[in-house]
Amino acid sequence: MEKNNLTFQDIIYEVRDNSAWIIINRPHKYNAFRTLTLKELYLALERAELDENIRTMVLRGAGDKAFCTGGDLDEASQESGYNKEMNYWHKKVHQMIRSVSKPVIAAVNGWAIGGGHILHLICDISIAADTAKFGQAGPRVGSFDAGFGAAYLARVVGEKKAREIWFLCRTYTAQEALEMGLVNKVVPLLELDDEVQKWCNEISEMSPTAIRFLKAALNAETDHIFGFEGMSEVAVRLYWNSKEAKYYKEKFLKEKKRKPK
């Protein structure tokens, strides 16, 4: 295992064999991202893309509780409830995961909720620990994602299931995620990193040029969703401070306070 000489605050960047492991290192926040986290994720993905020795990238959350639980509410609640810079970098990270020429594997070690759920969704492959949980929360907290979070989700799990996931905001186990095609494999938590590295090593034996063309071809049919994502960002910005959105945010926060942590 080799650590990169770049200094990061919110993430860890490690090189294992020919794989770049990019780990969101905010376990005290259930690996929720802030603007700095997203900027660092973008830089890490860029570095891995430009490193000719790297053949695969892995996205993971630190610890064993959460992969990522979306935006950090402490920062997201600034600027009258909408942080424009955070949402800009969130979109840039989505674009980078899709546009890098190397496979990106999500190692889902725990909760993948909201924006964190979308991060794993747009990775090329998802391998989940048996303790992982998946779900969306937007309509419950006065938000939504009408880009990859909705349009691409329907491509992955089907129209009916995607509507269920968004309209009911339920959470799903790793086994349920496997059955709906949301993840590729489920393994015990203690075996997660080894299993992911096995997949990375197998991919590293393949022709990198062939992989590059295949990823581009597989993405081609859904690249138009970037247009939906741009419109969705503007729509959310307009909706965020409406009376309706504020009502559901306040309702969610009150319920959260009443429930045991």
Image (cartoon, rainbow, N blue to C red):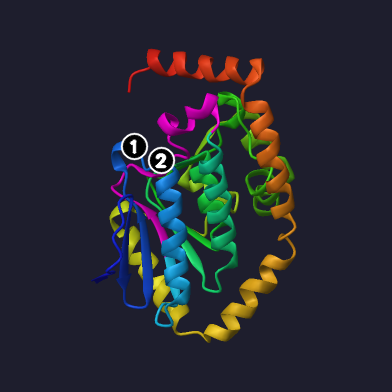
Q: Nearer the viewer, residue 95 or 218?
A: 95
Vertical side of 219 occupied by 31: above or below: above
Number of other residues with Cα within 10 Å of mark 2, as a class: few under 14, some 14 to 19, many 20 or more: many
Number of other residues with Cα within 10 Å of mark 1, as a class: few under 14, some 14 to 19, many 20 or more: some
Residue on which disc 1 sits: 29
Amino acid carrying mark 1 in the image: Lys
Q: Residue at x 65, y 53 (%)?
A: 156
Question: Which quarter of the figure has residue 232?
Answer: top right
Question: Which quarter of the figure has residue 213?
Answer: bottom right
Q: Residue at x 72, y 59 (%)?
A: 222
Q: Residue at x 55, y 63 (%)?
A: 124
Whether label 2 touches label 1, CB < 8 Å:
yes
Picture mark count: 2
Query: Magenta stretch containing residue 33, yes or no?
Result: no
Quadrant including the N terminus? bottom left
Residue 186 visible to an observer of this rendering: no
Q: Is residue 125 left or right of residue 8?
A: right
Query: Residue 143: x percent and y percent?
Result: 61, 30
Residue 209 visible to an observer of this rendering: yes
Over which residues does the magenta segment extend?
A: 58-82
Query: Residue 60: x percent and y percent?
Result: 38, 55
Dot 2 lies on which element?
loop
Q: Is residue 40 left or right of residue 5?
A: right
Vertical side of 65 occupied by 258: above or below: above
Residue on which disc 2 sits: 32
Query: Magenta stretch containing residue 68, yes or no?
Result: yes
